[in-house]
Image: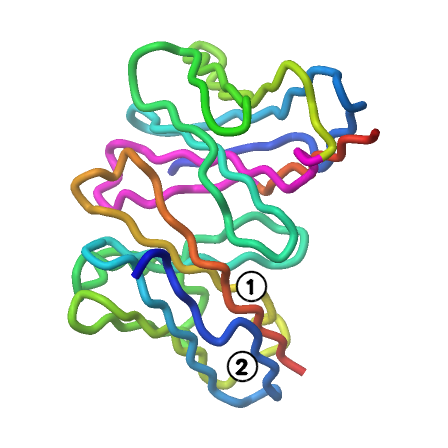
């Protein structure tokens, strides 16, 4: 069965510094990987995805993520954090062998960017 | 509609009562998913609809939970004899079945509180 691990409950960074939010996954087949962000009292918003091709994918708001097959990781990164990036971030995986196409989500990482 | 709409946005109910949560997906989206987000937890998959049928109900936590979808559009999640542990945010998402690699569009959720 597929699973996603986000080992950090919270990540704290200073504004202007680079940030990384970690994600590792486990699937039977090939993975489709996603990052979503949740702002307070809002629904989840799509940030970026990896389906195939270039291992470095770029998404909304200056975020990017790197797919590493050997380490089964898909860490979210941003070169320079903004206070407005403070939110809850979820990594998700879809196993291409799962006919229901469902996404399995990690437990979430709260990002706090201090001024 | 332009987005995924869920109602009510908040629901407080007494333990033992039944509740119905509604999801209006994006027009034309054939796939519909229900997830549950408990405090401090990630998103827990509940059920997947393809059109009006539910080929994957593996996430429903007990037989108190059921869901249906009519006309390939609106879906209702019903929780019978609610318990305090059912308190959570219930999220609905939809996607175009043929483009599963684009992930989902989520609604803003229904916050259920069982007292």
Which residue is the site of mark 1?
A: B89
Residue ID at (17%, 60%): B51
Residue ID at (35%, 45%): B104
Coordinates of residue B21 in the picture (x, y in percent): 43, 75
Coordinates of residue B79 in the picture (x, y in percent): 45, 78
Element type at mark 2:
loop
Q: Earlier in the sequence, mark 1 or mark 2?
A: 2
Res. B77 image quadrant = bottom left
Is the same chain shared between marks 1 and 2? Answer: yes
In the picture, which quadrant includes the N terminus of chain B? bottom left
The residues bearing labels 1 and 2 have C-alpha atoms spaced at a distance of 14 Å
Which residue is the site of mark 2?
A: B82
Res. B58 image quadrant = bottom left
Examine the rendered structure and indicate whether residue B82 appears above or below residue B103: below
Task: Please report the bounds of the magenta region as a residue range.
Answer: A84-106
Is residue A41 highlighted in magenta?
A: no
Bin the neighbour count of mark 2 within 10 Å (Cα to Cα): few under 14, some 14-19, many 20 and up: many
């Amino acid at each position: 069965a597929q699973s996603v691990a986000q080992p950090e409950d919270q990540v704290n960074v200073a504004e202007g510094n680079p940030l990384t939010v970690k994600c590792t996954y486990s699937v039977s087949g090939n993975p489709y990987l996603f990052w979503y962000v949740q702002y307070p009292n809002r629904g989840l918003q799509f940030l970026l995805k990896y389906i195939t091709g270039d291992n470095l994918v770029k998404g909304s708001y200056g975020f990017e993520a790197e797919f590493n097959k050997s380490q089964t990781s898909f860490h979210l990164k941003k070169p320079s954090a903004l206070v407005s990036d403070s939110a809850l971030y979820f990594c998700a995986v879809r196993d291409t062998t799962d006919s229901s196409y469902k996404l399995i989500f990690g437990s979430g990482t709260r990002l706090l960017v201090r001024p | 509609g332009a987005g995924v709409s869920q109602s009510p946005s908040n629901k407080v109910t007494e333990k033992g009562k039944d509740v119905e949560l509604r999801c209006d997906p994006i027009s034309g989206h054939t796939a519909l998913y229900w997830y549950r987000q408990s405090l401090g937890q990630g998103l827990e998959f509940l059920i997947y609809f393809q059109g009006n049928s539910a080929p994957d109900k593996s996430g429903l936590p007990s037989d108190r939970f059921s869901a249906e979808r009519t006309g390939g559009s609106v879906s209702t999640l019903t929780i019978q004899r609610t318990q305090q542990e059912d308190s959570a945010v219930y999220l609905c998402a939809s996607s175009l079945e043929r483009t599963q690699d684009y992930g989902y569009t989520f609604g803003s959720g229904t916050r259920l509180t069982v007292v």
